[in-house]
């Protein structure tokens, strides 16, 4: 090392002497200086027996650990959760349920409001007579269950007038009980026999066509009717009903065929859903949603979240045992929503908020096995940490509501310790010794 430095010094002195004698141009001086600096760097690079520096990867603060922490909700600065129900009911569900299969027995209630007049292309005229009346029932064959066929579907007159929004197995309308639970039945209006699995069934009237239609016309549908199933255990998922008839108008000779959908309808079932209680519930009829309001922690795993990088964040929910008898049989698609208002303050618009782009699924088989439900909230936590905002308010709903009669429940903050929710964070803390 010393010999190399001596030779470099001698070369440098010789170069200076030559420069004094020749007095070269500035460009030549620059070239010599550059050559000298390069030579010094090469020589110093060859001196490896006594390192003078270390690699930057070994400098303090440059290696940042990835930290994974599961925070029980009781250790967060604040946490509130609740379940609210009634956003979709049997009266506005996408299906109707007819079942004589325990443990859930169900009947469809409906009412046709037959019009007094019919509009044609040229005018509007009252009805003279009703002819060729028929009732068509449409079914979802993939969701209907049959023990054996044939089965008989009957349409029965009701003894009390029902209200679609408040009718249950015990009451015909709010505050008015049925004479018998499930409805007080009168005469048979129509019936049909389902010989094989089919998506449609035509019911033949058991009463005079014109008399029935006149009565429904005069009484705005009357008390309504109940659709029931007789015979082997059967569960039908009905997608709709239609009333078809050929009225002849006053002063006309030819009938004007009409088709009227069932608008005033619901279904009632026994036994009813259990009340929500303290668990978090999703799905079912009436549709249940759950809401969460919490604050992010300042510290997690001994590290500050401020200035750190949130790699992943999720809410972990622990499923409760399958509810009986209304456990979801198929997966429920759900969506996370960011709320615009506090769901714990009563108000008509409390549950409204912007929905997330991604759906998550409640798989009954996994839930029954105890597999936790993990809901990704990484963007929300990352934004809250960046903006130094601690409050996060979320809602979770079926998408869309009222697709299934069944539901599932999860532990809340009031549940036993082993099924309470938790917050899982994977993050990279800010370096303790940042390098400029």
Image (cartoon, helix red, strand yellow):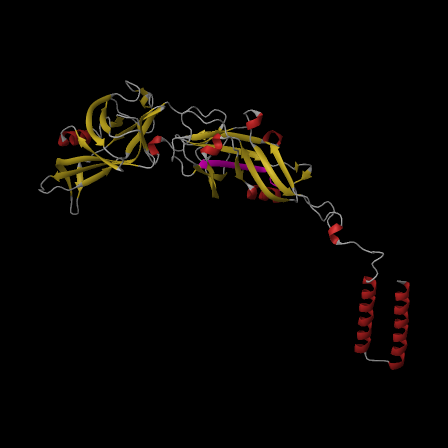
Residue in view at x 38 percent, y 24 percent: 272
Q: In this view of the protein, can residue 394 be seen by the observer?
A: yes
Q: Please provide the residue range marked out in magenta.
A: 388-397
Magenta portion: prevailing SS class:
strand
82 vs 56: above or below: above
Quadrant for the N terminus, please: bottom right
Q: Is residue 384 left or right of residue 128?
A: right
Q: Is residue 31 above or below residue 250?
A: below
Corner quadrant of residue 133: top left
Q: Residue furthest front?
A: 148
Give the total of numbered labels: 0
339 or 378, which lies in front? 378
**In the image, residue 393 lies in the stretch drawn in magenta:** yes
List the single residue furthest toward the top: 179
Q: Position of residue 394 (x, y in %)?
A: 51, 37
Q: Describe residue 77's horizontal placement relative to residue 10 as left or right.
A: left
Q: Position of residue 329 (x, y in %)?
A: 41, 32
Quick one: which residue is furthest to the bottom in this view?
22
Q: Is residue 435 visible?
A: no
Q: Quadrant of residue 156?
A: top left
Residue 430, how many percent across, how many down?
A: 68, 45
Residue 263 in percent (x, y) is at 28, 35
Does the segment drawn in magenta span residue 318? no
Residue at image x 67%, y 40%?
304
């Amino acid at each position: 090392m010393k010999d190399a430095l001596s030779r470099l010094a001698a070369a440098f002195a010789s170069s200076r002497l030559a420069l004094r004698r020749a007095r070269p141009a500035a460009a030549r001086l620059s070239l010599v200086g550059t050559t000298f600096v390069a030579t010094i760097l090469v020589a110093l690079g060859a001196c490896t027996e006594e390192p003078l520096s270390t690699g930057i990867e070994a400098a303090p603060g440059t290696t940042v650990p990835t930290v994974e922490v599961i925070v029980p909700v009781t250790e967060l600065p604040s946490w509130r959760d609740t379940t609210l129900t009634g956003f979709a009911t049997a009266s506005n569900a996408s299906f109707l349920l007819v079942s004589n299969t325990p443990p859930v027995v169900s009947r469809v209630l409906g009412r046709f409001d037959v019009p007094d007049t019919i509009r044609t292309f040229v005018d509007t005229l009252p009805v003279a007579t009703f002819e060729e009346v028929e009732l068509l029932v449409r079914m979802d064959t993939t969701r209907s269950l049959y023990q054996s066929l044939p089965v008989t579907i009957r349409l029965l007159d009701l003894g009390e007038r029902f209200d679609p929004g408040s009718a249950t197995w015990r009451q015909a309308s709010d505050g008015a009980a049925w004479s018998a639970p499930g409805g007080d039945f009168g005469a048979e209006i129509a019936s049909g026999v389902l010989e094989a699995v089919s998506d449609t069934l035509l019911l033949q009237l058991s009463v005079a066509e014109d008399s029935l239609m006149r009565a429904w016309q005069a009484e705005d549908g009357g008390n309504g009717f109940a659709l029931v199933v007789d015979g082997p255990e059967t569960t039908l998922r009905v997608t709709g009903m239609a009333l078809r008839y050929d009225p002849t108008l006053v002063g006309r000779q030819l009938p004007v065929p009409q088709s009227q959908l069932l608008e005033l309808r619901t279904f009632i079932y026994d036994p009813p859903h259990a009340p929500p209680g303290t668990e978090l519930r999703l799905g079912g009829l009436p549709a249940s949603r759950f809401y969460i309001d919490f604050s992010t922690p300042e510290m997690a795993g001994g590290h500050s979240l401020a200035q750190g990088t949130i790699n992943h964040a999720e809410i972990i929910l622990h499923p409760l045992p399958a509810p009986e008898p209304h456990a979801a049989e198929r997966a429920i698609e759900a969506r996370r929503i960011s709320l615009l208002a506090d769901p714990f303050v009563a108000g008509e618009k409390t549950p409204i908020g912007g929905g997330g782009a991604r759906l998550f699924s409640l798989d009954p088989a996994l839930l029954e096995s105890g597999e936790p439900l993990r809901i990704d909230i990484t963007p929300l936590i990352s934004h809250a940490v960046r903006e130094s905002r601690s409050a996060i308010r979320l809602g979770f709903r079926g998408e869309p509501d009222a697709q299934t009669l069944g539901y599932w429940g999860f532990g809340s903050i009031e549940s036993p310790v082993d099924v309470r929710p938790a917050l899982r964070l994977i993050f990279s803390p800010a370096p303790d010794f940042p390098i400029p």
